[in-house]
Image (spheres, rainbow, N blue to C red):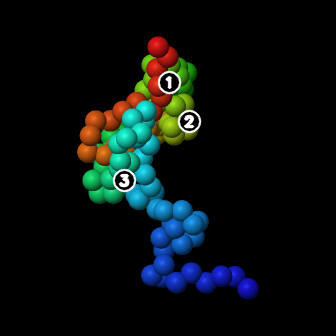
Amino acid sequence: MPQEIKPEDNSDESRTGAAPESEQHIDAGDNSSETPTKAPPAAEQQVVRITLVGSRKAVLKTIHTLYLLGFAEVSDWSPPQPVKNSNDVASSLIRRQGTGTIEPSVKPNT
């Protein structure tokens, strides 16, 4: 018989055994003496949407160039979608970050 989920028990922890994403600890990096901080709730996050529009070839080339520059993983972008009444495609990237600065998702090679 399928397990019934109660409406008031809709947390990620109850389904997966893990704390919800907003309560998971963020890696403190190399400084292990720092106390891990909680990820900010979605309401406190900054959202930036980046959209590329152009020929399929140009959009894919730009996505790969931005990856090489350490801006974003190729898989972070939406698949190219046709733009109405043109031969162009569009691909978008959404970045969410806490109240601090928006960091690149890829570490550049140094």
Q: Residues within 10 Å of mark 3 (few under 14, many from 20)?
A: few
With respect to residue 69, does 31 lie above or below? below
- Amino acid type of the residue tagged 2 in the rendering: Ser
Q: CA distance from mark 3 to mark 1?
A: 28 Å
What residue appears at the point 36 percent right and 33 percent down from the top-left corner? 103
Q: Which mark is residue 75?
A: 2
Give the secondary structure at mark 1.
helix
With respect to residue 27, does 14 lie above or below? below
What residue appears at the point 61 percent right and 84 percent down from the top-left corner? 4
The quarter of the picture where residue 95 lies is top left
Give the secondary structure at mark 2.
helix
Q: Residues within 10 Å of mark 1 (few under 14, many from 20)?
A: many
Q: Which residue is mark 3?
A: 38
Q: Is residue 85 visible?
A: no
Residue reaching furthest to the right: 1
- Kindly report which numbered mark, 2 or 3, lies closer to the viewer in this rendering: 3
| Residue 16 spot, x, y in % from top left | 58, 65
- Amino acid type of the residue tagged 1 in the rendering: Tyr
Q: Which residue is mark 1?
A: 67
Could you tell me which quadrant the N terminus lies in? bottom right
Whichever of callouts 2 and 3 sits on the residue coming sooner in the sequence is: 3
Q: Please tell me which residue lies in front, 89 or 44.
A: 44
**In the image: residue 45, left or right of residue 61:** left
Give the secondary structure at mark 3.
loop
Whichever of callouts 1 and 2 sits on the residue coming sooner in the sequence is: 1
Q: Is residue 11 visible?
A: yes
